[in-house]
Image (cartoon, coloured by chain):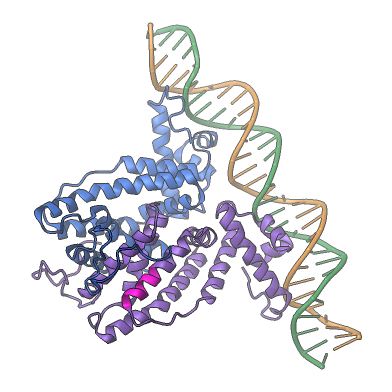
Chain colours: A purple, B blue, C orange, D green
DNA sequence: GCGCTAATGGGATTCGAGATTCGTTAAGCT
DNA sequence: AGCTTAACGAATCTCGAATCCCATTAGCGC
């Protein structure tokens, strides 16, 4: 998976080859899924020698890992609208769109599957989502500054709370996801955030119905 | 994956072989992960002929699929304590324990990975989690009847909301999970549930700050 | 434009997962 | 206990993915 081969000649052809191969990989993932990935076929589709694909990426997992890095680099920062609910809904919708898009959805699923098999892939996946989450926390932080959410709100966890139920349905429980599920995720996260459930006042439970809850963390683990 | 081969002679040896192979599969998953699954090695470890494993399960995915069915069958119903918060915390802790256990965690990861490659595995995974979710909804329903949660609360979605952030961190964003993450999940879900965020009063948004939100579902999709 | 060499490309080769064959064992039934 | 045959197991075969070899192409510095 030596993506910048000798660190000496990464321009021109090398870059074109990488682009063509990663493009072909996404196409193949959309059509046959992770398990159906065929290196030979990807090489053909990309108009590239099979040897080159094996040499540079080593195998399907290397391809997906590099694809993750590529997608992470393509990240774009969104301008905030000043309306937290609209921002979160936009986030939920973008996650929903990504997961339901045949090509991108299959790519995300493959990335997740690859991460369960390979440490480098897991690291790349972590970096990918760290970046994605980071793109949205700013809007939540602004809402905190505007006073819409309690001070100390863990903005990254609010964003995770939007994605989590959608990913849970898409990759874990394998239930259908739609705009209703996305709206529910926003409602839950926003309601909890307003109530201070994402504030990390360590030692004091936020659970309103049980103010006497002890200072210790959760039992067991 | 013909688990009950001829439906004629599933007793004695056949059952022992299945048990030994599934046991060996879980061991192998804990040690080498999904990608490192080696049918030959599993057969050796189970003290069974390689041919038998191929004939009955067809391949790694078939093994994992059968393993899911087996684990689903081993499900146990928990008695409710009458304390919703304690129930949810118990749920979160059991999920946390499962995901952090080397052997069981690897098995769950493998199940998720297999589902991204194969339709039968995806169906089995869906059935597995449908059952797991169903084991816990009863406690939430009781809380609704006790009046602790609003009538109409979607109990299955409350349970999903507990698991989702933990699975999200474990398999998607690849962030560490601990008892604090579990406690946070419970707090968020419980807070949102009490505020009625899991009530499906279609056409009226629950979002407290925006009572004028229109009746339509979420835009786009 | 020219030379150097990183990088690619086609094809032969290796290697192992998965399928096949056929003899052996033991479950189920009387 | 004895019979029938479902199910298992050892050895073997096959085919395609992964690797290797060497010729060819084209970045990059001058």
User: Is B55 drawn above or below residue B130 in the view shown?
Assistant: above
Which residue shows up at 25% across the image and 62% down it?
Answer: A221
Rendered location of residue A201, percent (x, y): 20, 78
Q: Nearer the viewer, residue A69 or B51?
A: A69
Residue shown at 16% from the left, 60% from the top: B85
Q: Is residue A206 visible?
A: yes
Residue in the foreground of this view, choosing between B150 and A69: B150
In percent of width and height, residue A7 lies at 66, 80
Decide if residue A204 is on the left or right side of residue D3: left
Q: Position of residue A121 (x, y in %)?
A: 51, 65
Q: Secondary structure of the magenta portion, mostly?
A: helix
Asked if B205 appears above or below A138 in the picture, the reply is: above
Q: Residue at x 44, y 79 (%)?
A: A78
Asked if the stretch drawn in magenta spans residue A169, the answer is no
What are the residue bounds of the magenta stretch?
A: A84-92
- Which quadrant of the view contains residue C20? top right
């Amino acid at each position: 998976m030596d993506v910048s081969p000798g660190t000496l000649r990464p321009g021109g052809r090398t870059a074109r080859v990488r682009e063509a191969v990663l493009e072909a990989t996404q196409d193949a993932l959309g059509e046959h899924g992770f398990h159906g990935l065929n290196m030979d076929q990807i090489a053909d589709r990309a108009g590239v020698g099979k040897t080159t694909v094996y040499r540079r990426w080593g195998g399907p997992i290397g391809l997906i890992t590099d694809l993750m890095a590529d997608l992470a680099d393509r990240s774009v920062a969104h301008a905030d609208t000043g309306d937290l609910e609209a921002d979160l809904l936009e986030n939920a919708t973008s996650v929903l769109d990504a997961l339901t898009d045949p090509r991108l959805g299959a790519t995300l699923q493959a990335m997740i599957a690859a991460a369960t098999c390979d440490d480098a892939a897991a690291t790349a996946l972590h970096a990918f989502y760290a970046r994605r989450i980071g793109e949205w926390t700013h809007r939540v932080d602004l809402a905190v500054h505007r006073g819409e959410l309690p001070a100390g709100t863990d903005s990254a966890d609010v964003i995770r709370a939007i994605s989590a139920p959608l990913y849970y349905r898409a990759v874990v429980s394998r239930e259908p996801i739609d705009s209703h599920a996305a709206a529910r995720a926003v409602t839950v996260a926003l309601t909890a955030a307003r109530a201070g459930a994402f504030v990390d006042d360590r030692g004091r439970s936020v659970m309103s119905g049980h103010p006497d809850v002890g200072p210790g963390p959760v039992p067991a683990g």
